[in-house]
Each structure stands twice: as structure tokens, then as C-alpha cells.
């Protein structure tokens, strides 16, 4: 099965998701002449947006580099990918709950919102784990220049992030700031895992296929 | 007519549709400190979302594999495809009605919502049937490795699902849970029909064109 | 300048536009047990949606076939295309006004809504006219198999539709149904103009480049 | 790293962004029979939409031409690009604030809205500047026909626009119309900078690689 339409569809979902996050910003209720204060009070929306954009953006970088290691896909990869995308579409909702409850500042409700965000993040990581396990068992799909080691190295990254999000859930019962910190750490973990993965990929490539200048898109057309 | 822009446009519509379904989630009305209960009460939104995402995802898988059996398209395929996409865009609305009425639990209104969802699903199936009939009569568009049998085998699948959705409509007058069950069965039917179709495609390919390792997207660029 | 990214961006805008039209459907206000009547009363939304989907779909078909006659684009085509897309994005708003005023049935307001829709349609046609005039003067961009006649034949189609939309505006002061009819006729005119254009393109191709079986997307990858 | 998926994702975000701007139009509150006046009073929404569409459209043209000068991208370009897209997604919010406050006409609030728009525009320019600086230092990514001079010439354009937006912020404390004028000038500056850049690109190409007729997309398939 060709990988290009698979990537195009995934890119479509990622680009829409990352863009509709911004729809969480809306004109605040304010008394005439006091828009400035009302906008400043929207900092939780901005904070939740920055973190979620960074999160979805990192997931896209992962998806982009990871599926470049495959030569082709099969039906199961296509279906697992739909599950991954499903889990990512869910981020929008707890993001708006976190922003909303941070503005109201009721501890009970903030706890619920952070736990929901954690649960979605945990679910996202599990869907990536399923994909990793599947591809680890289907080495016939991988590109020749990628070593089996590559898949083994990253295979347990999602479980590591699951542990962080689990800790954030437990922390939510004691301290909202600690839970928030752990959630952000989990997302940062993905980013550093991405940097490591893409570094490994570059090394694999340099070793196996000496880099060659690629013709520009322009020239090929 | 080239098939690539046709697929890109379809992928665009599919990816947007599957993503805007998630906009049905919104911050519930709740009294401070009771967000948890309010979120739990949104289970109908989650249920309707899971089913509809699975439905649109399955339709995309179908679209993806089915149009890979064509070498080129003509104007009529392009127009029939616009009709298919039209029918799929309608899913969003009955999905939100089902979620809304399941939360309120008025039997009359739930019946209306399920019947509307059934009618849209029935319409979606009929548009696919039109496409199947058209392509069955225009075998010049198909790729050489696909047999005519392939199109004959799947041709009546949409009508089978129409029967299930029809039964769901009739059931709605007696029992909402039964109607809901039949609706979900109809959507599951698509999924199993997809698995069978893609299995047939794989067999067809193995027979006619021995599978070859494909160059990765990376290398080609 | 390569035409592929130009087409990808346009397809993106078209597919989003045609999909967000459906967001005009929302759960109606209704008293418990009377959802059916409330949904039936939404027929103006459905009517406006069907017409607008058909309109944007036809414009996409045009865009698709027309830009397949070019070998490359230049900066001005890119900028004119942004103007075309701009005009098309405006359709969403008068569509919702037409649906809204048809539900309320105040003659004054319906008139305003239809005139606004006509004005947007008129603007869309004018932007296509600008593109046609520009490309008629830049025959170096066209594909070798397309004759200069092709561009001359369709050049004045947009002005013909402008006349129909102008008539619809005038009619709005006397009769809303007549104005609505003329608006729908204008959109149907685009569809028949499209059928004629794509017919001419096919003839041009048969004459100059004998049709050849194209390799499937699958095989190329 | 291949540039095509990078461009597809960016085009996705650009096309969604430019299309959701139109969601700022909504049916105005009006008394029956006076829709016309209510629509006319929405001129600030239209003005903000025209300017913002023109702004995002210009940024897309930039992005389109600029990244055509690269043969490949690396991880850092991918991440800087996510930052650029992030900054552009923010435009939607101050655009709606500007439209809203222009309708209400409270000087204090208009000032806040314009300053916010300026800050976002300033941020957008800075993210482009970061990208320019990075690519200026990584000439190995550029296509052979593009001269180093090309990157040097445009490198400081973003800082020039930053100066204009800075002036608009200062002006907002004295005169809203002057601030609005400077904001529009800043956006027009991008457009003229784009025209100059794409002109330089064309010259570079004519000098190094003599223009050749490119095969149409149709024929290649």
C-alpha cells in the first residue's frame, strides 16, 4: 500500500487539529474600556494553547520522521494510524477544560480538567505504543537503511511518558501546580524523545546511505 | 484525468470532517466544584463521537483502497465523488442530535435523532452504490491487476447496509436501544466489508503483480 | 513556478470551505418531544446548504479542470488565485443569512440576504473573469495540447453568469421566489458551463495527444 | 529530509487558517426588517477580514516562494517552521478583537485590540527572521541556482516590518486611525517585499538555469 496518501491524510488531520486549537480564543466578556484586563485574564487559554500546540506539533514531528522509516504500509498500519489520530483529536477538549477551570480557579474542577488532559495524553502514548509494537513485529515494512535497533530503541518511550502522566494524575489529588508541572514534563519528554529519535535516524542514514544532494522540487516538475 | 488531485481533495474533505466532529465537545454547564459529574454526563457526546469517527474513518479506508484500483478517473467519477463527500458531510449534524437527545432522554426526540442518523447513513450507502454501479460499467478506468470480479463482489455491499439502516429506522418506533444497536451494526458491517474488500485486493495483487519492495518516499526525493 | 503546490493549497481551501458550510446546521431550539417539527423547520438551512455545496463543488470542478490546462503558473496567477479563493470564502456568510431569513420569513430581510448572496456570486464570477483574461494574454503558460480557442470559448462565461446574478438582484425588489430562482439558475449555469468546458478539453486532448493508459498511483510508488 | 511533506503540512495549516478567518462573520442581532443596516454595521468585520486574508495570503506566497529555494530541509527548519505557523495561527484572535472594538468604538478597547494585532504581527515577523538567520547560516540546504546574495538581501526585511509594527504600537497611544494605518502599511510592506523577493528569484533562475517548458501534471501521471 502506498505511503503517500496515508501521509497526506494524516497531515490533513494534524494541520486541522493544530489550527482549530486556536478557536478556543474568544472575545471575553468585559465592561467597556477594560478590554486590556479581560485579555490578560485569558492567560490560561494562552498557556493551554501554547502547551497543546507544542504537544501536537511534537507529535507531528514524530509522525513525520517515524513513517519516513517505512517503505510501505499495510492495512493494519492504516487502521492503527486512525486510532492514533483519534486519540490526538481528543486533546482539544481537555485543553479547553484546563483553560476554563484555570480561569475560575476551583480546585476540584481544576483537578478534573488536569486528570482528563492526562488521561488523553496517556491514551495518545498508548496508541503510539501499539503502533511501535506492531511495526517492531513487521520489519518487512521498514526502509532498508533503517536498522532493527532503531525500532527497539524507541519502542518503550511511550510507556515512559505513560508513567509521567500517571504521576501527574496522582499528583492532581495533592497539588494542582505539581500535576500541571508533570503534565508539561510529559510533553517535554516527547520532545526530547523526538530529538533523540531523529538524531538516531540521521546517524543510521549517514552510515548506510551516504547523503546525496537531492534535486529541488522545482527542478523535478 | 489524473487521480492524484482527486484523491488530495477527497483526503482534505475526509480529514476535515473527521476532525470537526470533535467540535461537538463543549464545556458543559456545571456548578462550581461539580465538573466531574458534568463531564461524566457527556458520555452520549463521547459515544456518538467514537461511533461517528469510526464510521468516517472506515469510509476513508474504503475510499483509499477502492480508488487505488483505478488507473484514472473521468468527469463522472469526479462528480459522483462530490456526491459521496456531500453525503458524508451530513453525518456531523445527526451525530450532534443523537448526543443531545441521549443526554435529555426524551423518547420521541431520541427516535427522531436516530432516524435522522439512519437516513444519512442510508444516503451515504446509496451514493457509494451509485459509484460502484458506474465503475462496474466503466471497466476502462480500472488498473490492469484488478479483476472484474472484484467490482462484482463488492457491488451490493451498500445495499446490504441500506437494509440494516432500514431495519434500524423501523426499530426506532419500538425500541431506541434496538435502533441504536442496529445503527452500530450497520457501521460495523462497513468495517467488515472493508476488511473483506482489502483482503480481496491483496490477493488480486499477489496473483497478478508479484509484490516488489517499493522505494521509500525519502529516497525518491 | 511549479503548479503542484498551487493546486494543493487551493484544494485545501476548497475542501475546508465545502466542509465548514455544514457547520451552519445546529441543534434547533425546541420543546421536549417536538424535535421532529423543529428539524423540519430547518429546511431553509438544508436548502441553502445543498445549493451552496453544489456551487462550491462546481467551482472546484472548474478549478480542477481549468488549471490542468496549464503547464506552469507565474506569480500573477498565484495572486489572482488568492483573489478567487477569497471571493469563494465569502459564500458561507450570505448562505447563513439566506437560511436564517427564510426561516423568519420577513420579506425585507430575505431581500437583503438574497442580494448579498448574489453580490458574492457576482464577485466570484468577476474574479474568475480576471483570471481568464490574464491567461488569455499569457498563452506561454498553457499546455501544448490545449488550443488558444479553448480559452477564447470560455472567456465570457463569467460575464454571462454576472448578468444572471444582476437579474436576480433586480428581481429581489419585486419577488423573492423569482430572485431565488435566478440565483439557482446562475449556479446551474456554472455547472453546464463546466460540462461544456470539460467536454471541449476532452476533445482537444483526443485530437492532439492520443489517450494512453496511465500507470496507477500504486505502481509508481 | 524531504521537503514535500513539510510543504504539504504547511499548506494545510495555511489553507485552514485563511479559511477559518471567515468564521468571524456571524448573523448580527437585528430587529425584523432591518437586516440591511445590521449588515452594513458589520463593516469592521469585513475590513478586518480583508486585511487579515491579504496578510495570511501574502505570508503564504512568501512561504511558497522562499522554500522553493531549498533543496532539502533539516530538523531545525521543521521546528522553526512550526514556530512560524504557531505565530500565524494567533492572527485570528486579535483580528476578531479589532473587528469587535471597531464596532463598539471605545477608544481604550480599540487601542488594546490594535496593539495586540501589532504584537502578533511583530511576533510573526520575528519568527520569519529566525528562519532567515538560520538558513543564512546553512547554505548547504539551498538549491544550486540560488545565490547566497538572495538570502542576504531579504534577511533584514522582517526587522523592517518590526519597526513599522513598533511604530503602530506607539501611535495607538495617540491616534487609533494612525495606528491602524501603520498596521496596514506593515502588511503592505510584506507584500512589496514579496514582490521584490520573487522578482529576484526569477532573475536568479533565468541567469543560472535557462527556463525550460515543464511537463504538465496531467502528462506526467
Image (cartoon, coloured by chain):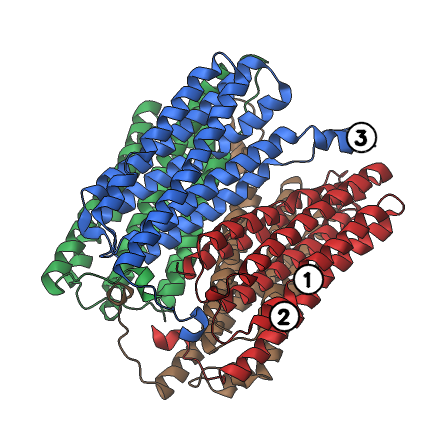
Chain colours: A blue, B green, C brown, D red
Q: Nearer the viewer, residue D188 or D95?
A: D188
Q: Which residue is mark 1?
A: D157
Q: Badge 1 sits on which subunit?
A: D
Placement of D8 over or under A101, stated as above or below? below
Residue at point 35% right, 85% down?
C209
Q: Where is mark 2, residue-wise?
A: D197
State the SS at label 2.
helix
**On the rendered structure, is D46 left or right of B66?**
right
> x%, y% of residue C166?
69, 66
Q: Residue at x 55, y 30 (%)?
A: A96
> Contact (CB < 8 A) between labels 3 and 2?
no
Contact? badges 1 and 2 (CB < 8 Å): yes
- Which dot, 3 or 1, sits closer to the camera? 1
Dot in front, 1 or 2: 1
Q: CA distance from mark 3 to mark 1?
A: 35 Å
Residue D96, position as x, y percentages in the image: 70, 43
Tell me the crowding category of disc 2: few under 14, some 14 to 19, or many 20 or more residues within 10 angstroms, Cα based: some
**Residue at the limit of the structure toward the right, as seen here:** D174
Whether residue C61 appears in this view of the structure is: no
Amino acid at each position: 500500500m502506498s505511503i503517500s496518501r496515508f501521509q497526506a491524510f494524516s497531515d490533513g488531520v494534524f494541520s486541522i487539529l493544530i489550527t482549530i486549537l486556536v478557536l478556543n480564543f474568544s472575545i471575553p466578556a468585559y465592561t467597556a474600556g477594560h478590554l486590556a484586563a479581560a485579555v490578560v485574564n485569558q492567560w490560561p487559554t494562552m498557556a493551554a494553547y501554547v502547551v497543546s500546540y507544542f504537544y501536537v506539533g511534537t507529535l507531528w514531528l514524530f509522525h513525520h520522521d517515524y513513517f519516513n522509516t517505512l517503505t510501505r504500509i499495510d492495512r493494519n498500519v492504516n487502521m492503527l494510524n486512525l486510532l492514533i489520530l483519534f486519540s490526538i483529536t481528543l486533546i482539544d477538549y481537555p485543553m479547553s477544560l484546563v483553560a476554563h477551570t484555570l480561569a475560575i480557579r476551583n480546585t476540584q474542577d481544576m483537578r478534573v480538567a488536569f486528570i482528563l488532559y492526562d488521561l488523553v495524553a496517556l491514551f495518545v502514548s498508548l496508541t503510539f505504543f501499539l503502533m511501535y509494537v506492531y511495526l517492531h513485529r513487521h520489519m518487512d515494512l521498514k526502509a532498508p537503511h533503517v536498522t532493527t535497533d532503531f525500532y527497539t530503541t524507541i519502542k518503550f518511550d511511550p510507556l515512559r511518558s505513560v508513567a509521567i502522566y500517571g504521576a501527574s494524575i496522582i499528583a492532581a489529588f495533592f497539588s494542582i501546580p505539581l500535576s500541571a508541572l508533570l503534565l508539561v514534563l510529559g510533553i517535554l519528554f516527547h520532545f526530547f524523545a523526538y530529538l533523540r529519535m531523529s538524531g538516531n535516524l540521521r546517524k543510521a542514514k549517514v552510515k548506510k546511505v551516504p547523503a546525496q544532494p537531492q534535486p529541488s522540487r522545482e527542478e523535478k516538475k
